[in-house]
Image: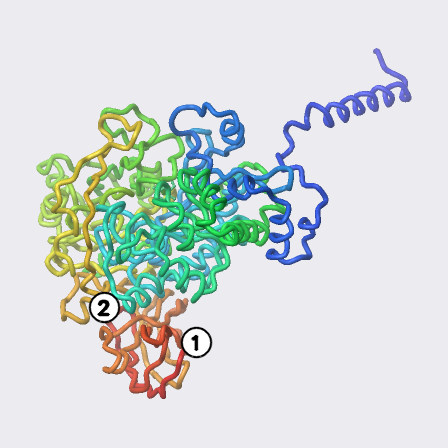
Amino acid sequence: MNVLPQGKAWGLLTGLLALSVGLHSSAWAQFEPRRPTAPQSPWMDRTLSPDRRADLVSAQMTLDEKISLVHGVRFPDFGLPPTDPATAAVLARSNGGAGIVSGIPRLGIPDLNMADAAVGVTRGALRSRYSTALPSALALAASWDIGLAEQYGALIGRELRDQGYNVSLGGGVNIAREPRNGRNFEYQGEDPILAGRMGGRMMRGLQAQRVIGGVKHYAVNDQETGRNTANAVLDKRTLRETDLLAFEVAIKEADPGMVMTSYNRINGDYASENAYLLNDVLKKAWGFKGFVLSDWGGTHSTVKAALAGLDQEQPEGQFFGVALKQAVQNGTVPISRLDDMVHRILRTEFASGIVDEPPVHRVVDVFGGLAVAQQVAEQSIVLLQNTRGLLPLNARRLHSIALIGSHADVGVLSGGGSAQVDPPGGNAIIPPPLAPGSLPFFGGVVYYPSSPLKAIRAHAPQARVEYDSGSDLTSAVALARRVDVPIVFVTQPMSEGRDAPTLALPDNQDALVAAVTTANPRTIVVLETGGPVTMPWSKHAGAIVEAWYPGIRGAEALANILFGDVNPSAKLPVTFARSEADLPHPVLPGSDITPEMRAFPGAPPNAPKFPMLPPFDIPYTEGLKVGYKWYDAENKTPLFPFGHGLSYATFAYSGISMEPGRITFTVKNTSQRAGVEIAQVYVGLPPAAHEPPKRLVAWQKITLAPGASQTLTLLLEPQYLSVFNVERDTWEVLPGEYKLFVGSSSRTLPLTGTLSLSGSRTR
Ligand code: BGC
């Protein structure tokens, strides 16, 4: 046996060790996270305030360095390779997101690597990266759960860092003023307070991961039709109390680093050069300290935009590059304004933690992400209708189940456009004429591999569970007749860049549901939609479940709800109209203008085309009457009202009492099942306020054991009781009688009371 003497063996070992240490310090160094070489400079002192640090570093910067911070370099991974070496050098450092701003390595200022991340980190496929595809943001809003919103944001923030990003471009809080808006799935519903609180808390969770976050698209980007040319027309009071209120609430909640302007015009001026929106409201009235960046290609001028308050052009420097430098040199834009832009960007970088603790690449926590995605889906799927207690299903009593339509054998639908999270393994369906598993194209229809068929089979192992594509009515009806329970899946694919032409489900799906529900009254209809749709067949459906775009664990969450392992608790964050005719704008504004249709550059031949329209006005004549406020004021009965959502438990409300600033009442679980209720408080302002009949002002989500009750005291935030006085440019509580309504939806309000207030300025 060749045995080395002990001393020799040790020598060999230490020699090898030394060799590996040597290797580590040389060859391995290239695998260290790339950090800008940060000199030990005064602005690297973490004990100083972000403002002070920004001032110290900006004092060292040349004019060119300042200019380089206020515009993007270009959209990475898109178009021809750059010819200019400086651009190529920065792009080589890009992480592959939607944008990159060059850092200043000599001063230790990092590049800004920006990724769209509304429902998860996007654009992973090109670099083989995985991100958790969460349920849509609108689904999150249906949970009405502030804590869950924080978890949703935290997950996105963690995955951004793990992938090397330091900036999120998510955070949409445009209210669903237009229910056909193609991007409603990226936003938080129709109520400004709900949207602001949910979107804000989501962003707070994200920024807590030391990533710069923002809110968008500021403002009134409430439809995609004509988004680059349309002019939203609203009076100042309406602006402040509706669309802008959602931003105000979100900004208070999150203190975000950025605000992204919208593409459209508002009362004549583009959002990116709208001095009222940017300087007067955002920066002066709300005290926003972060920076304002334009949407991609949404900057239209140098001097006007700079003076109106835009701080950064994206994704390139057409107006804020050489042109801005010249404007500063010739004095049309004062250097103090450029310094303010730079200060805002730098102070955000220091405040967020991205300078002190740059992201380090790691493998995303896939399993942790799946758990959060499922939890959000379970909290966000809304039980709209449950005739004669059809749900929850009892697996032991079922012999046969049919799943019909919408690729329910393989996956669940997702939202398209820049919020699209790439599906692991590629698209779960094969949109012709593409190959299986191919990369999704912008605005294309993409399914995640979360199979309802598999999930339902797992819950009912003794039953025969079959799938029918729904493409042939006769076969779908025959199957529906044969089984105990048919579950028909319907989908509404939505995407950035276009709206739903009508509220009706596309592709003749209403006919499929009508036929199946007629064939078997025990039919369950599952909707996967970007927002509200009409349901001419609703009376005939046994149960209706709104699953939104439920994300990577959507099917598993849905099955848990259908079989009662999870008791549904979500409530609608948007009103579902009975018909198009009931909407404030029965015809989608701009949809009657003949568009020039353009495909997204580089898209395959079957890609959806995007309409380019000439300029037109959208007079938002409904004003304050957005969403449920419209139905209340116009005495219209919705199909399913805002705030509606059933549980397998039942709840009773009693014992209302109030005093200025708070309201108290009791909720009791009157069933044999544990359940979660979202108790809602609405307020009707005194007649002198000339407001819609009521507005949501508070809510609380509670879990109650069978038979248990809980007395809740909810605080009434003064601003939520206020109106915006345009002459005095302030919010005020008017003196008079305030009606309070408490209950389980905006139309089921068993408790009412009155509160007398003397009136005051809110700020
Ligand atoms: C969208 C933004 C997005 C940006 C970058 C634009 O088309 O409107 O929401 O952040 O692209 O992808």
Quadrant that contains the N terminus = top right
Q: Position of residue 758 (x, y in %)?
A: 36, 88
Left or right of 686: which side holds 304?
right
Residue 420: % across, % down: 35, 40
Q: Would residue 593 be seen by someone viewing this image from the given angle?
A: yes
Amino acid bearing label 2: Lys
Residue 394 in view of the camera: no
Quick check: 259 above or below 194? above
Q: Nearer the viewer, mark 2 or mark 1?
A: 1
| Residue carrying label 2 | 629
Relative image position of residue 22 (x, y in whole percent):
77, 24
Label number found at residue 763: 1
Ligand 1, image quadrant it occupies: top left
Q: Amino acid at mark 1?
A: Arg
Say what secondary structure mark 1 lies in.
Answer: loop
Pick the residue in front: 64 or 180: 64
The residues bearing labels 2 and 1 have C-alpha atoms spaced at a distance of: 25 Å
Residue at 50% x, 44% y is: 329
Q: Residues within 10 Å of mark 1 (few under 14, many from 20)?
A: few
Relative to the observer, which residue lies in front, 126 or 545?
126
The reply, left or right, for residue 589 in relation to residue 730 is left
Left or right placement of residue 59 versus residue 725 in this view? right
Q: Position of residue 339 (x, y in %)?
A: 54, 51
Q: Secondary structure at mark 2?
A: helix
Please name the residue shown 37% across and 58% down the image. 275
Which comes sooner in the sequence, label 2 or label 1? 2
CB at disc 2 and ligand 1 closer than 8 Å: no
Q: Is residue 724 left or right of residue 99?
A: left
- Nearer the observer, 489 or 136: 136
